[in-house]
Amino acid sequence: MPDSLTLREIKARPVVLKLKRPVVARIVTISEWPLVLIDLVTEEGIVGRGYLEPYIVKSLRYLVPVLHDLGELLRGRSVAPVELFEAARKSLHFVGYEGLSMIAASGLDMAAWDALAKAANKPLCVLLGATVGAVRSYNSNGLWLKEPAAVAADALELRDEGGFSALKLRLGRSDPREDLTTLDAVRKAVGDRMHLMVDYNQGLNLAEAIERCHTIDDYGLDWIEEPVVYDNLDGHARLAAELKTPIQIGENFYGPREMHKAIARKACDLVMPDFMRIGGVTGWMRAAAIAGAAGIPISTHLYPEVAAHVMRATETAHWLEWQDWADPILERPYEIKDGLLHIPDTPGVGLEWNEAAVAAHLASV
C-alpha cells in the first residue's frame, strides 16, 4: 500500500431515494431523501468514499458544485484529513463556517479519512486507535406523528428489525394528550424493559416545552430531544435544570466549539452531534474529546457506518442512532443484530456503492 496519498479529484453525485417510512414531524414532512455520494479519487488509485444527507432535495444543486470546487482547489495536496478540512473551511471563510460551508467540508473529511484508512489497510476504527467490534444502537427508522395504534404497531416492527432494545419516537402533536396516548400505547406494546427516547424536533416554544416536558417527566424516558429550536440554549438550560429526564441536543452543532458553548451554559445533559455539521470525523473526534472532558455521554446522529467506527474510539460513547436510509445505494449494508451494529473487518469505513441503484436514483441539479 502507498505511504502517502495525493488528491486527484472529488466526484460528487446527487441521489434521491424514497423513504419507506416518511418523516412526519412537527416542523416538516419528508418523503424523498437526498444524498450526495462523494468519491475522493487519489493519484495512487485509492478512492475514499462518504456521503451527505442534507434533508432538502434542492440543497443538492448547491452542495455538488461546492464539492467539485473543493476538488479543484485541493488537487495535488496530500490526503491528510485534518489539513484538508482546515483548507476547505478557510476557503469558505468569508461566507461563514456554518451551513453549507461546514456540510461540504464535512463530506470531504469523511471521504478523506476513508481513503487514509484504506491506504493503511485498516478499518477506520483501528486507524483511530480502537478495535473492530459492535456498537450499541437504537432504531430511529420510524415512529413519526401518526395515530397511536399505528405508532405502537410500528414500534413492534422496528424492534424486530434488528433485535433492538431501544427505540426513538417523535412527539409534538397539536393536542398534547395524543402524545401521551401514543407514549402509553408504545410502552404497552414493547414492554417496560425497552429503552425509549423522544424527540420534539424543535417543534415547541418554551412555554409549551415547559408544560409538556414536565408532563412526561415520570415516563422513564432515556432522554427528551430538542424540545425547542436548536439555538435557544437558554431555553434548553432551563429545561435541563428543571427536569429529571435528561435533555439531549446536538445534531445542529456546527463545529465542536458550538458543543462546548452548549455544555458550558448547561443547556443539555447529553449531546449527539451530526457528522455533516460537526465536521466529519475530524470534527467528531474534537467534539468527543470535549464531551469526554466534561463527562457527558455522546451519541451519534445519522451516518451509522462512519458513526460506528468513531464510537469505538470515543470515551463517553452512549448510543448510535440506527437509520437505514442510505442502504438502497450501498453494495453491502452493515449488519444489525441484537441491537448492535457490526463493523465489517475491511479497510476504511466499508462503503461501496451499488452502481445500478445509484444510476436508478440519480437526480439532476
Image: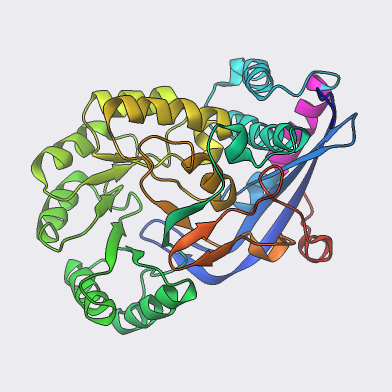
Whether 228 is drawn above or below 285: the answer is: below
Residue at 10% across / 54% down in the picture? 214
Q: Magenta segment range? A: 61-74
Residue 216 placement (x, y as % from top left): 14, 61
Q: Is residue 50 left or right of residue 177?
A: right
Residue at 29% across / 41% down in the picture? 270
Residue 172 visible in the snapshot: no
Residue 332 placement (x, y as % from top left): 70, 62
Residue 147 placement (x, y as % from top left): 32, 79
Q: Nearer the viewer, residue 235 or 289?
A: 289
Which quadrant would the N terminus be assigned to in this image?
top right
- Number of numbered discs present? 0
Q: Is residue 116 left or right of residue 317?
A: right
Q: Is residue 274 magenta?
A: no
Residue 281 visible in the snapshot: yes
Residue 175 placement (x, y as % from top left): 21, 69
In the figure, residue 143 lies in which quadrant? bottom left
Residue at 46% across / 53% down in the picture? 135
Q: Is residue 63 magenta?
A: yes
In the figure, residue 157 lies in which quadrant? bottom left
Q: Nearer the viewer, residue 290 or 279?
A: 290
User: What secondary structure is the magenta-colored segment mainly?
Assistant: helix
Whether 121 is drawn above or below 323: the answer is: above
Residue at 80% across / 28% down in the picture? 71
Work out which residue is located at the far front of the displayed protein and give it: 131
